[in-house]
């Protein structure tokens, strides 16, 4: 039975899962959710995610929500000798992957997401004006997080070691949108972070996803 992923291609969280699915060459169906019509708040979707947020995944009788949990499931389900984004065969490497996945969730994402929301979501989807104070505060926080990354990347090619993992993949979509804003300088000002970003964003799996991340594109 084909995996069904409910979401929107331009969504950061949906695209995160899409990138993971493409890394494994998994067969899946992307089922669009009409956010403008509030489909994600209707009973049919709330049965998949009671919090009414995308994405959600169905695999047979299993239903999952929360993008990091979904991508972890995908990585576990399809792991093999050619691709193991969790490094499950090596306990030490697996622990480092989990550590940096937590860093992305607890340090990186809370700092970058307000910049994305204020710079792209507010003006484009809500027709409002960005709150510069929020952006400035978040940019300062993100800069401190990226300083840690800059130091870490001086000793390894990727965050968890000299191997690409889910810890790196989880950063892709927010940074992709950040690079459409003036705050992309936070990446470009740090040479090791910039090189890491250029590396992970050039992967074929993410290139398939990036074409759908169209928020903020000029018509």
Image (spheres, grey):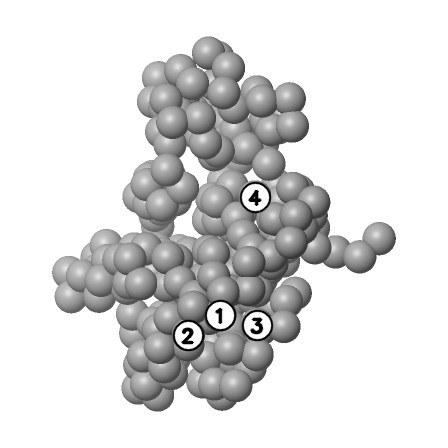
Foreground label between 4 and 1: 1
Whether tag 2 and tag 1 are in contact, CB under 8 A, the answer is yes
Mark toward the viewer: 3 or 2? 2
Outermost top residue: 43
Which mark is first along the chain, 2 or 3? 2
Separation (CA) of disc 3 from disc 4: 19 Å
Mark 3 touches mark 1? (CB < 8 Å) = no
Q: Secondary structure at mark 2?
A: helix
Q: Work out whether mark 3 precedes mark 4 in sequence or the reverse, and give the earlier one.
A: 4
Q: Where residue 151 sits: x, y (%)?
A: 32, 85
Q: Is residue 64 above or below residue 158?
A: above
Q: Please give left or right for residue 211 compared with residue 84 in the image.
A: right
In space, the residues marked 3 and 2 are separated at their CA atoms by 11 Å
Quarter of the image for residue 145 reads bottom left
Residue in view at x 65 percent, y 65 percent = 180
Graded by Cα atoms within 10 Å as few (under 14), some (14 to 19) or many (20 or more), the crowding at tag 1 reads some
On the image, the x and y values in percent for residue 111 come to 40, 62
Q: Which residue is mark 3?
A: 183
In this view, the mark in front (3 or 4): 3
The residue sitting at 60% across, 48% down in the picture is 121
Q: Is residue 90 visible?
A: no
- Residue 187: x %, y % from top left: 51, 77
Q: Nearer the viewer, mark 3 or mark 1?
A: 1
Query: What residue is pinned by disc 2?
Result: 140
The answer to whether the residue labelled 3 contacts the one labelled 4, judged by CB atoms less than 8 Å apart, is: no
* Number of other residues with Cα within 10 Å of mark 3, as a class: few under 14, some 14 to 19, many 20 or more: many
Residue 140 percent coordinates (x, y):
42, 74
């Amino acid at each position: 039975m084909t995996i069904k992923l409910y979401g929107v291609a331009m969504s950061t969280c949906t695209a995160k899962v899409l990138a993971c699915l493409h890394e494994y060459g998994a067969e899946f169906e992307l089922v669009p959710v009409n956010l403008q019509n509030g489909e994600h708040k209707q009973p049919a979707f709330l049965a998949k995610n009671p919090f009414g947020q995308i994405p959600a995944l169905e695999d047979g009788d299993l239903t999952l929500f929360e993008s990091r949990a979904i991508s972890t499931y995908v990585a576990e389900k399809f792991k093999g000798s050619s691709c193991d984004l969790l490094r499950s065969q090596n306990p030490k490497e697996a622990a480092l992957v989990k550590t940096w996945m937590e860093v992305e969730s607890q340090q990186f994402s809370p700092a970058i997401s307000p910049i994305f929301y204020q710079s792209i979501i507010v003006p484009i989807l809500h027709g409002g004006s960005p709150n510069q104070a929020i952006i400035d505060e978040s940019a300062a926080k993100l800069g401190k997080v990226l300083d840690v990354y800059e130091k870490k990347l001086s000793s390894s090619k990727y965050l968890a070691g000299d191997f690409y993992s889910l810890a790196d993949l989880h950063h892709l979509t927010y940074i992709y949108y950040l690079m459409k804003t003036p705050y992309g300088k936070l990446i470009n000002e740090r040479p090791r972070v910039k090189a890491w970003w250029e590396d992970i964003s050039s992967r074929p799996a993410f290139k398939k996803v990036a074409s759908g991340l169209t928020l903020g594109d000029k018509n």
